[in-house]
Amino acid sequence: MAGESVLVIACGALAKEIVELKQLNGWSHIKIQCLPADLHNRPEKIPGAVRAAIEEYRADFEHVFVAYADCGTGGALDQVLDEFGIERLSGAHCYEFYSGADEFAALADEEPGTFYLTDFLTRHFDRLVKKGLGLDRHPELMATYFGNYRRLVFLSQKESPELEQAAREHADYLGLEYAHRHTGLDPVGRTLGEHVVQWLN
């Protein structure tokens, strides 16, 4: 089928990798519509934002896929998607999308109190974490948000000494141990490909 027949509604934090995979794999049949990444700081707003995007765009596409995991919505996102018969990324957190389910489970078992960064979140840490959570204005909130965390794991998509150094600095700022796992784009590509390739004609 010529043209874009599949709409992928994605978290803005996943946008760069999904766009890159679209180009690398020749997925010309998909269109990517991204929602603001800072919704992750207000997960209760994700279901409504996804619903609005579905209602606005679905009439123009044969298929819709949502590139969110549950992402802290407590099942509310699934309730929206069930109404429309639309699938999403599996799992509770989109970090599984980056690392793969098995690796993510191993990391969680190794240290349940783990905070994760990706390339995107590392680049935008000041805006999404420091400012987004109000830590720049109220540093006393650090214990409230991060008191139960023990470790920061940087899941990197690109090999970048600059990003690795930034991630280390972010771990120091949060008072967390630092660990690095390079994931590349393979887990993202496999997971997304399972959903979008089925509609490639």
Image (cartoon, rainbow, N blue to C red):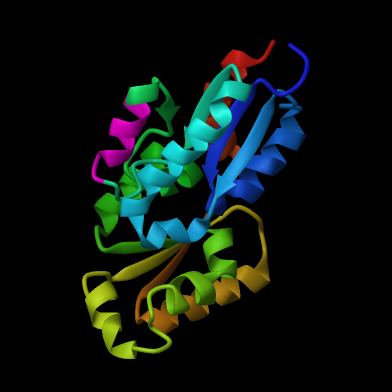
The residue located at (38%, 33%) in the rendering is 90
Residue 15: x %, y % from top left: 61, 48
Image quadrant of residue 68?
Answer: top left
User: Which secondary structure type mostly characterizes the magenta part of the structure?
Assistant: helix
- Split into 4 quadrants, where in the image is the N terminus? top right
Count of numbered circles on the image: 0
- Whether 103 is drawn above or below 123: the answer is above
The reply to whether residue 100 is visible in this rendering is: no
Using the image, determine if residue 10 lies above or below residue 167.
Answer: above
Q: Give the extent of the magenta segment.
A: 74-82
Q: Position of residue 169 (x, y in %)?
A: 51, 80
Q: Quadrant of residue 40?
A: bottom left
Say if 191 sits above or below 181 in the image.
above
Q: Residue at x 29, y 47 (%)?
A: 73
> Which residue is at a point 42% across and 24% down the rendered structure image?
86
Residue 79 among magenta residues: yes
Which of 12/90 is in front? Answer: 12
Q: Nearer the viewer, residue 57 or 42?
A: 57
Residue 136: percent from left, percent from top = 43, 87
Q: Is residue 20 above or below residue 200?
A: below
For this view, does 69 lie left or right of residue 140? Answer: right
Indicate the position of residue 173 as horizontal and vertical percent values. 42, 83
Question: Is residue 124 visible from the viewing direction of this image?
Answer: yes
- 31 or 105, which is in the foreground? 31
Name the quadrant of the C terminus: top right
Residue 176 lies in the magenta-colored region: no
